[in-house]
Amino acid sequence: MAASASASLRHHLLLLRRPRFPLGPSPTFRTSYLPRRHQRLFASAPSSSTVENGEPSSPVEPSEGASVVDVNPPRGTRDFAPEDMRLRTWLFDQFREVSRVMAFEEVDFPVLESEALFIRKAGEEITQQLYNFQDKGGRRVVLRPEITPSLARLVIKQGKSVSLPLKWFTIGQCWRYERMTRGRRREHYQWNMDIFGMPKVRAESELLQAIILLFERLGITSSDVGIRVSSRKVLQAVLNMYSVPEHLFTEVCVIVDKLGKLTREEIEKELITIGLSSEAVQGIIEVLSLKSLPKLEEVLGSDVEAVADLKKMFSFAEQDGKLRAICGGGRYDRLLSTFGSEDIPACGFGFGDAVIVELLKEKGLLPDLSRQIDDIVFPLDEELEGPASSVASSLRRQGRSVDLVEDKRLKWVFKHAERINAGRLILVGKSEWERGMVRVKILSTREEFEVKAGELQ
Amino acid sequence: MAASASASLRHHLLLLRRPRFPLGPSPTFRTSYLPRRHQRLFASAPSSSTVENGEPSSPVEPSEGASVVDVNPPRGTRDFAPEDMRLRTWLFDQFREVSRVMAFEEVDFPVLESEALFIRKAGEEITQQLYNFQDKGGRRVVLRPEITPSLARLVIKQGKSVSLPLKWFTIGQCWRYERMTRGRRREHYQWNMDIFGMPKVRAESELLQAIILLFERLGITSSDVGIRVSSRKVLQAVLNMYSVPEHLFTEVCVIVDKLGKLTREEIEKELITIGLSSEAVQGIIEVLSLKSLPKLEEVLGSDVEAVADLKKMFSFAEQDGKLRAICGGGRYDRLLSTFGSEDIPACGFGFGDAVIVELLKEKGLLPDLSRQIDDIVFPLDEELEGPASSVASSLRRQGRSVDLVEDKRLKWVFKHAERINAGRLILVGKSEWERGMVRVKILSTREEFEVKAGELQ
């Protein structure tokens, strides 16, 4: 919420807003892919490979009793055709693999939640865009806009039975409802990692490490992404320096959060309006524009807790090299009490599925995700469908992926084999089968030979 | 829809209703776990290991502005705590592995769909229990009760660009809304496998093979489950035998579908009421009570297409041994035209996540799914947190799952290691670290030794 600092090209620190939850006193972070248009919680640009429906109007509008149904998914949502699904599965596998090495456990929650979980912070964009409605039983429900409240709910429910810290992750769909502009989506998937019961900055540092490990796996480097870190402690320290009264703290936060949306002049004006001295305003703006941790230390002094925390967090992170990402997170030590429970220190991030895919595309970092199967089994004769079926089934039992093809011409089968990157073509022909053999063709080498059906592997 | 037959203990054929889509002329199937209370599309009994909310009343009702939030998920829905999630992941992995060896491609769709997709068949239970509502834009939407219409929608959308047959699978959540009785759920997950563009009985036989492969993987045998196969062709053949007029066909189907719900006498009475001769009624009932395919052939004659199809399907299946399951499926060759498109032969099944888990529990077939991690790294001193963090991070880069623990007593760490089935404990102590070493303890053997930090693997 204050102080911008960038120690080197490797660490782009920008102390920025942490938008979603009641903040604890410790540093928060929000990593971002630099093109600014992507810095929304929900990515605005559609992933182009996905069958989407974000157009202002659909070609065919569905209506009750109409004879032609709308072939598009509901406005703002996506179908995942096989090629889109392969990409999504690959990305989620990366999320899961990183979560596994970090020793986080996977959890999941209903996409439909009670509205009560989300209306506690009126005025935030996330509550204005709730996809909420009343069910047939009169209950106010919502397609969740984020997953953290559900996590907190389960932590409260499990109560004393669990041993802290909890390290949980989840990958789930989140929704918002707003008027559709071109290409906007109403849903996205979000990878969440959360730690409950770890009050120290180690929690933030573990979460950062997870993000770094992900980027390493994906081949994304510090030249692609930057990290912004916010610290309420830093802002508090600056306010203390200028003896700004404590009751103005929240208001200052709200104004400082607008950094990047408003100009420097507009922010100065707003700070003056709520009663800050022009000296304090200048001081805050100065800290906001700092680009390195050492300079921050110079201004605030090294004995300030805020600086010590940040130094610790970055000394941990330093060991990890590349530090840039596209996600948002931070502490929410006081969320549980807003739900009427005892607070547990908590910290987490949400990482969307859209912006990262765009970045990977832009950088040419997406792997080859074409379809791939092991074998095609093809009977050359209708009478041999039974034998072909048993050949296929025996290969499948050995774990090979087998496409059993019937009622096609051989020419089609070869084209098909190419299209789906089949490894082998297994032809079941009459004369071979009478000798208990099948014909095997290795498609990459065009090699061809006969094998005993029972010995096919 | 007609003729019950059981060739042997291995094949429990029961020609039964196929409840959801306009039926084609070919055999349909519906496999079932024998305890009859489980034969609903949505399993009625909750999976006991899951944190559910199917109770008639929640301990704390949420209300706007209340200070204590309801810690339960919305009524009829589940949270997946880590242990529940491990079970779900394991089950879904089985679904995915079988789909992979069968060379099916994964697809996915929004859980929120247009209501128009589902209101085409008024009177079915599935439409009476729609979880539907109006969104803020006035559109009628629904939390989908099943996935097939979305699949069909995407097939229509892709149009001529795809090469048939398509073999698609998906695992997704489905919803229904009904008054909650104890333990009932409003959502479940469903594995769907569907084949588009394969008119012959090979499609059914491939789907059956998938189910059989799944059961083999799970260790479920023919003594645990049975299979029921329905064929409209069989019923048609019987009606032809007794010269029942064609316009009565649908009505006969509806009545015959009640088999198992009504007594034999009640079904006979209903058939008489719609105008069948008592001779025809006796003939139908006779075929319904047949217990083997050869007997069916005896009654109908071997030249009847219905019998030929069934014989083919079971000769394919015969090669697979164990044949029993818990799911429902069949042909829906005429679904696409109800959406205003050209029909494509189609066939598929839906396989829920609840009943199978119950069966596996009952049979003791669930694998050990306790948490398991490779290493715990623990600094013996606060000063060593940095080094411990870099040790953890290096192991994680090697793909090991590492829990980095701080601020705990050594005694807690040992207990924790046991609880999470850690393989090794890596202690970072001052005197060892000064020599560039860490202490490694293999937890299963209590073996203990020092390793150079840089050489730790």
Image (cartoon, coloured by chain):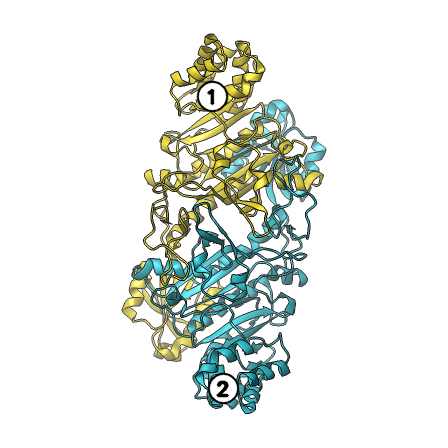
Chain colours: A yellow, B cyan
Amino acid type, mark 1: Ile
Whether labels 2 and 1 share one chain: no
**At x 40% / y 52%, what residue is drawn?**
A73
Task: Report the mark closest to the observer, 2 or 1.
Answer: 1
User: Of B63 and B22, which appears nearest the observer?
Assistant: B63
Q: Residue furthest bottom?
A: B279
Q: Is residue A98 above or below residue A30?
A: below
What is the number of the mark on residue B238?
A: 2
How far apart are labels 2 and 1 at the CA level? Answer: 79 Å
What is the number of the mark on residue B419?
A: none
Q: Is residue B436 visible?
A: no
Total residue callouts: 2
A446 relative to B41 in the view: left or right = left
Amino acid type, mark 2: Val
B348 relative to B430 in the view: left or right = left
User: Of A207 and A391, which appears nearest the observer?
Assistant: A207
A211 relative to B424 in the view: left or right = left
User: Of B365 and A277, which appears nearest the observer?
Assistant: A277
